[in-house]
Amino acid sequence: MTSDFSFTVSRTEGAARTGTISMPRGDIRTPAFMPVGTAATVKAMYPQQVRELGADIVLGNVYHLMLRPGAERVAELGGLHRFMNWPYPILTDSGGFQVMSLAKLRKLDENGVTFQSHIDGSRHVLTPERSMEIQHLLGSNIQMQFDECVKLPASDAEVERAMRLSLRWAERSRKAFRAEPGRAIYGIVQGGANEALRIESAKALADMDFHGLAIGGLAVGEPQDVMLAMIETVVPHLPTERPRYLMGVGTPDDLIECVARGVDMFDCVMPTRAGRHGQAYTSEGRLNLRNAKYANDPRPLDENSPCAAGRDYSRAYLHHLVRSEEILAMMLLTWNNLAYYQQLMQGMRDAIAEGRFADFRRRSREIWRKDADV
């Protein structure tokens, strides 16, 4: 463990907790939501906007960046922080999930994965060692082990095979990780929807020298109750002194329920993707600006929002932009959505710190468990 990475829990309420991950490039307040900047950009956003909304860290992806523009090129240009003009912490996903979901003609074996690019069909090999090398070249601050993510539902035999392979790859990733100042590595718990496999994976990874531990292989087709059950199964077997990161999750309701079960970090494309498709997250719930009922609605998108995108533009105008397929619609709705997500995380941090998280959770569930305006 490097001495310049630390995690401090400042307050708990039940399993929910708030704290701080400290790294040389800045502190990460937890619970934290990481906007997804897959290809070195949070889509439709300026980096400074993302920062001003309250993001302490963003996420990049090995698979996409190795294909375009290439990790070696990014390194030659000064590393990912300089390349994308984001001087704060960056976490990189190892690329395992994207290889499984995007690549063409992939072949997996003990060594790694051989695949063809979804962009141009070029052939590549991604192993635990190569994934860690790419993350080193990019210069990311939190680096993820290379793993295999299985889409659910899947047979126990398939899930067990992938979990055990991911554990062997975790050992190789940890060995290949370069423990330099400002760098940390997380392991990834796998095991599908099988409690015994999840526990085995969590215990094995807890014994390895990782700075933090992630829960992977969820939000891949299973219902929310299954996801929450797996989190409840895994969290008691994760060290309390290390951050817990739930990968690829999720809706506002998901975030609230997972924080209630002890998760510290999240990432998801949902707020940015929704913004590009006319969907807005607001204090009233989710709104679909394509709906004709907004054509003559002069109200702001969200009068309770601290963000100009939600406060200063009418629903009628945003409806017009969406229906006209104007780029500004994507920009404004993405801005609004990321603002809402960061406001939600700050609300949870404050509620835990002040001992009122149970009430915050109850009130939030009333909004997010009603029918969405879709």
Image (tube, rainbow, N blue to C red):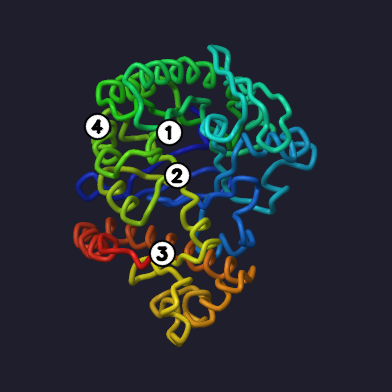
Question: Observer-nearest residue: 71 or 96?
Answer: 96
Q: Which mark is residue 233?
A: 4
Instruction: State the SS at label 1.
Output: strand
| Distance CA(mark 1)–CA(mark 3) | 25 Å
Drawn side of residue 359 relative to residue 160, left or right: left
Residue plotted at (61% across, 74% down): 324
* Discs 2/4, front: 4
Q: Are marks 2 and 3 in contact (CB under 8 Å)?
A: no
Query: Could you tell me the amino acid type at mark 2?
Result: Ile
Q: Are marks 3 and 4 in contact (CB under 8 Å)?
A: no
- Measured along the vertical axis of the image, is residue 12 above or below residue 122? below
Instruction: State the SS at label 3.
Output: helix
N-term-proximal mark, 2 vs 4:
2
Q: Which mark is residue 343?
A: 3
- Which residue is the site of mark 1? 212
* Discs 2/3, front: 3
